[in-house]
């Protein structure tokens, strides 16, 4: 027994020493590549005489703190993802190793929050060219509350602190999933400021950078978390699930990285003719190395893990982690290096600065369809939605089950319409013309949701997704079931709530200052367009949806709800047509094209579109409702007939027979009462 205890202590000590060795080696790799990248990229150029200089402390500390913050954020996300989704649970709670990861994530999230606050102070010093010792607290507070870059860092620090607190608040798997989603949101705010937000074509730059950061955090952080639980007996299964997740992350990182680099480089020759391009080539090389290591994991170490050999996985994962650290250092160096395409300039076109693209020419059919404005968010959403749906249909077909072709056509058509409305030329004009924006709104809130609801995606997912072999593992199907039957879903699918969200957003957006605020921010614009689709989906899911999770309501009540939505929509269009003041004047005055009609004339055109557009979708929904009503009556009558046939065969009374007997008895009682009353009168 003492010998076994000594061996256990020795293994624990050796494991701890190995962990510290990995941490030190990874940090050294990241810092070395960071400093080299800063020098190669020109971020450490000599100070120009006459311009303010923040001093060497800020110059060197800013990228190092940025690297530290990114590293802590990545590790936090990876530990939370692994605890909530990759490791098996213990009933409703996370596993013991999941509990360990939650507690460690709390500590790293706290360090992440401190790093974000420190980065905010260093950024003020860098922007103003003032040494740290001369900065005044009021200056930092003003930067944090009034400048978008400071606001994003403050928001990130607040979210990271919330993650740190919630990670210690409990051990339920639902709480772990919620904290994971919050941590994923927390890594995004800085993506909407800096190079990406200020560059032309920021529709591509911002959303591709956000996707890049999310995928990289899950990819790198997940590997770190697996190394932390390498002594667990569940490592083989968790590593297999991570491998599938990492494959998707590789694709996302590659596509988003190429799109982002294309925006910032401008032309292909800048890859070898600019210092920024050299760093991009270095990052591409690192990505290729990581791809090779990932393939080695799938081909060699996963089978070795299943056979009981953990050292092969640990050795290869450690090497991969060091390359990851160097890649993160290279990414930070890229963020500090000047790009070949200037982010802003003195002679920059103010419209391009505001919109991310030059003012479009007068609208024609060719311009509306032939001048695309790609947005990585909606392109990715539509590509994943179509690919995942078709994969589910194929799996059903292979299993010998039929899936209605009409549902597939409805879903694919809805996503293609969504992609066209948010990425073709009409998306350009939606920024500068109220009428084009209103047409985009109507399509996204009515036509697209009706088609998507008709695809019954939840039903397909529940039938096509496989159950995990381990009952303690929650796969995508299990999480989907939890979401469908959650209290939030029950609340959102309440008919009054769904109707209120749909109609309330119409009046709340256009009869307040909200539209102008959202149009000035790319994130706000994305949130607004997404809300249009989600609000419409909720309403039409309540009305004509067939997926589980929605409230089952009588068809007459559904018809009344639909009529109420039609009346609210028509009333909105009528009120908008009678409005004599310009909506969101601060935005539309700034971007009003010279070739366009007056603001009020264009606004009246948009009001007419809103008033008239809903007629055809409303008729389609009413036809679907009536058809479902008739089918429900037919099914109910068939059920009653089958019950009657069973009653005749068994000699038992069915519900219909008992109901008819009740009516007959009631009729005889009424006749007897009338006769008795007549006798009394005589």
Image (cartoon, grey):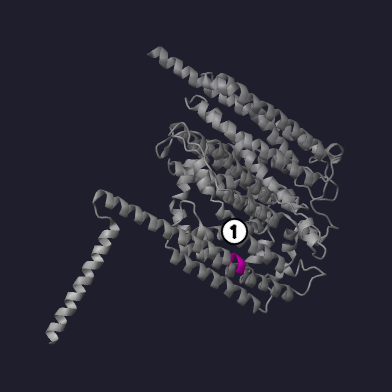
Farthest residue to the top: give it. Answer: 3
Q: Is residue 662 positioned above or below 314 on the image?
A: below
Residue 338 is drawn in which quadrant?
A: top right
Residue 215 is drawn in which quadrant?
A: top right
Looking at the rendered structure, the secondary structure element under dot 1 is helix
Task: Assign the N terminus to one quadrant of the image.
Answer: top left
Residue at image mark 1 = 531
Label 1 CA crowd tier, 10 Å (few <14, some 14–19, many 20+) = some
Q: In x, y percent, where is residue 252?
A: 67, 40
Q: Which residue does the image show at 50% across and 42% down from the upper left?
A: 463
Range of magenta residues: 614-618
Q: In x, y percent, where is residue 680?
A: 12, 84
Q: Is residue 668 left or right of residue 185?
A: left
Q: In x, y percent, where is residue 618?
A: 57, 66
Q: Is residue 556 left or right of residue 35?
A: left
Task: Assign the C terminus to one quadrant of the image.
Answer: bottom left
Q: How many marks?
A: 1
Q: In x, y percent, where is residue 636?
A: 39, 57
Q: Which residue does the image show at 59% across and 33% down from the upper left?
A: 244
Task: Verify whether residue 615 appears in magenta.
Answer: yes
């Amino acid at each position: 027994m003492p010998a076994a205890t000594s061996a256990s202590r020795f293994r624990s000590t050796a494991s701890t020493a190995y962990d510290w060795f990995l941490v030190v080696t990874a940090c050294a790799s990241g810092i070395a590549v960071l400093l080299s990248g800063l020098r190669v990229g020109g971020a450490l150029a000599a100070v120009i005489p006459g311009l303010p200089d923040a001093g060497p402390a800020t110059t060197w500390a800013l990228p190092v703190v940025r690297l530290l913050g990114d590293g802590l954020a990545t590790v936090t996300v990876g530990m939370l993802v692994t605890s909530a989704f990759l490791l098996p649970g213990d009933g409703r709670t996370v596993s013991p190793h999941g509990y360990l990861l939650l507690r460690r994530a709390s500590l790293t999230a706290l360090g992440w929050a401190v790093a974000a606050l420190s980065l905010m102070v260093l950024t003020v010093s860098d922007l103003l060219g003032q040494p740290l010792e001369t900065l005044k607290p009021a200056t930092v507070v003003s930067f944090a509350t009034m400048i978008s870059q400071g606001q994003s860092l403050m928001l990130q620090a607040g979210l990271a602190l919330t993650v740190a607190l919630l990670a210690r608040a409990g051990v339920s798997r639902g709480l772990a999933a919620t904290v994971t989603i919050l941590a994923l949101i927390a890594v995004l705010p800085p993506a909407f400021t800096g190079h990406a937000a200020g560059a032309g074509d920021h529709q591509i730059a911002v959303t591709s950078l956000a996707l890049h950061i999310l995928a990289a955090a899950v990819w790198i952080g997940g590997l770190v978390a697996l190394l932390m639980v390498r002594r667990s007996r569940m490592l083989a299964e968790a590593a297999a699930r991570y491998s599938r997740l990492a494959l998707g992350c590789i694709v996302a990182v590659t596509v988003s990285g190429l799109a982002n680099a294309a925006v910032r480089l401008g032309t292909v020759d800048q890859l070898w003719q600019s210092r920024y391009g050299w760093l991009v080539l270095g990052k591409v090389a690192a990505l290729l190395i990581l791809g090779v290591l990932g393939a080695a994991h799938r081909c060699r170490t996963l089978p070795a893990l299943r056979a009981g050999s953990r050292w092969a996985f640990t050795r290869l994962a450690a090497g991969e982690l060091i390359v990851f650290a160097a890649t993160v250092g290279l990414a930070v160096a890229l963020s500090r290096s000047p790009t070949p395409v200037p982010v802003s300039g003195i002679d920059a076109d103010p419209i391009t600065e505001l919109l991310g693209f030059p003012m479009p020419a007068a609208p024609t059919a060719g311009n509306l369809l032939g001048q695309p404005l790609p947005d990585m968010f909606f392109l990715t959403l539509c590509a994943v939605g179509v690919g995942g749906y078709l994969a589910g249909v194929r799996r059903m077909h292979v299993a010998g089950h039929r899936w209605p072709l009409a549902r597939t056509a409805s879903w694919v058509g809805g996503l293609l319409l969504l992609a066209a409305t948010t990425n073709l030329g009409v998306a350009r004009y939606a920024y500068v013309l109220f009428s084009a924006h209103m047409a985009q709104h109507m399509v996204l809130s009515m036509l697209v949701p009706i088609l998507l609801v008709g695809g019954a995606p939840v039903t397909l997912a529940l039938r096509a997704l496989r159950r995990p072999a381990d009952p303690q593992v929650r796969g995508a199907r299990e999480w989907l079931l939890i979401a469908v039957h959650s209290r939030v879903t029950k609340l959102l699918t309440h008919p009054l709530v769904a109707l209120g969200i749909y109609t309330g957003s119409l009046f709340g957006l256009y009869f307040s200052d909200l539209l102008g605020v959202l149009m000035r921010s790319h994130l706000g614009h994305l949130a607004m367009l997404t809300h249009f689709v989600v609000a419409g989906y909720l309403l039409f899911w309540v009305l004509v949806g067939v997926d589980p999770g929605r409230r089952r309501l009588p068809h007459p009540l559904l018809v009344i709800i639909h009529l109420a939505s039609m009346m609210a929509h028509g009333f909105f269009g009528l009120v908008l047509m009678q409005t004599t003041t310009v909506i969101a004047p601060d935005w539309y005055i700034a971007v009003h094209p010279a070739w366009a009609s007056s603001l009020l004339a264009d606004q009246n055109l948009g009001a007419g579109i809103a008033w008239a557009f809903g007629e055809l979708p409303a008729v389609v929904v009413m036809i679907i409702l009536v058809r479902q009503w008739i089918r429900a009556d037919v099914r109910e009558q068939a059920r009653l007939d089958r019950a009657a046939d069973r009653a005749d065969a068994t000699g038992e009374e069915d519900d219909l027979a008992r109901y008819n007997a009740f009516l007959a008895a009631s009729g005889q009682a009424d006749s007897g009462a009338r006769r008795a009353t007549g006798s009394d009168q005589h």
